[in-house]
Image (tube, rainbow, N blue to C red):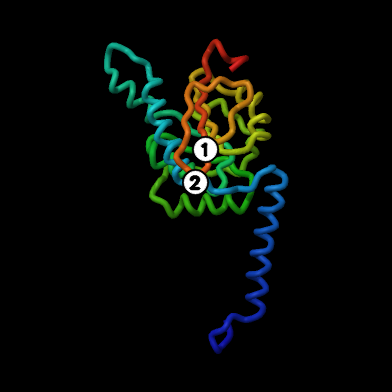
Amino acid sequence: MSSNGTISPAISIVVLGVALLAALSIVYRSWRNGISPMPSPAVVRRAAVRELRKLLRTSAPDTANGISRELDAAVEHGTIVESGSGWGSLALDLARAFPKRQIIGLENSIIPWLFSRLAARLSAVRNVQFDRSDIYGYSYKDAAVVVCYLYSGAMKRLDPILRAGLEPGTWVVSICFALPGWRAAHEITCSDLYRTKIYFYRIEPDEKEGI
């Protein structure tokens, strides 16, 4: 900054250059991924989290001894992976809703990934991490829940990966785009302008090959 309180031309050029590089990075990665990292609407995020909590409770073992304890355990334990976490808003909502679970957000675009990490540091939640990872190369075998807000082409690519990698009992939540050839165990329609659908799939032991 100059002596008269104005920003010097050199600093302006640096700031402009950084902003341009950031924009080019997002554009390039959006082109490579086939989708831009758009934040998910709050009403859709809330609906997905609310419904997931219900399903995790009802899918707990209904044993004669300590049913409430079993139900609580179903909500509290197991890793939730968001495949393509973008700016991190949904992953952070999941971390707040499931404070005893580990939440992992996968994002390969560097600017949204850095933003997500900063948002996580500034938030009060400590059970979320953001990995700069390729969603098609990631191993989902330890996930109890996989959440996706992608596009139809990405869901087609993930189809064989999830079929092969997920254990029976794992939930897959797909916002807006159904998994081709999969039978949804549950689905809802959100109250947003676009009436967004959310599909909930569960891997069953006898449906490993043809879900």
The residue lying at 46 percent from left, 37 percent from top is 190
Which part of the image, by quadrant, shows the N terminus? bottom right
Q: Is residue 196 above or below residue 158?
A: below
| In front of the other: 165 or 84 | 84
**Disc 1, SS:** loop
Residue in the image at 60% along x and 38% along y: 150
Q: Find the distance from the CA under tag 2 to the CA under tag 1.
A: 10 Å
Mark 2 lies on a secondary structure that is loop
Residue 201: x %, y % from top left:
52, 24
Q: Which residue is mark 1?
A: 196
Marking on residue 41: 2
Determine contact: label 2, label 1, CB under 8 Å.
yes
Q: Amino acid at mark 1?
A: Thr
Q: Nearer the viewer, residue 82 or 173?
A: 173
Look at 62% across and 33% down and name the residue there: 138
Q: Residue 93 falls in which quadrant of the image?
A: top left
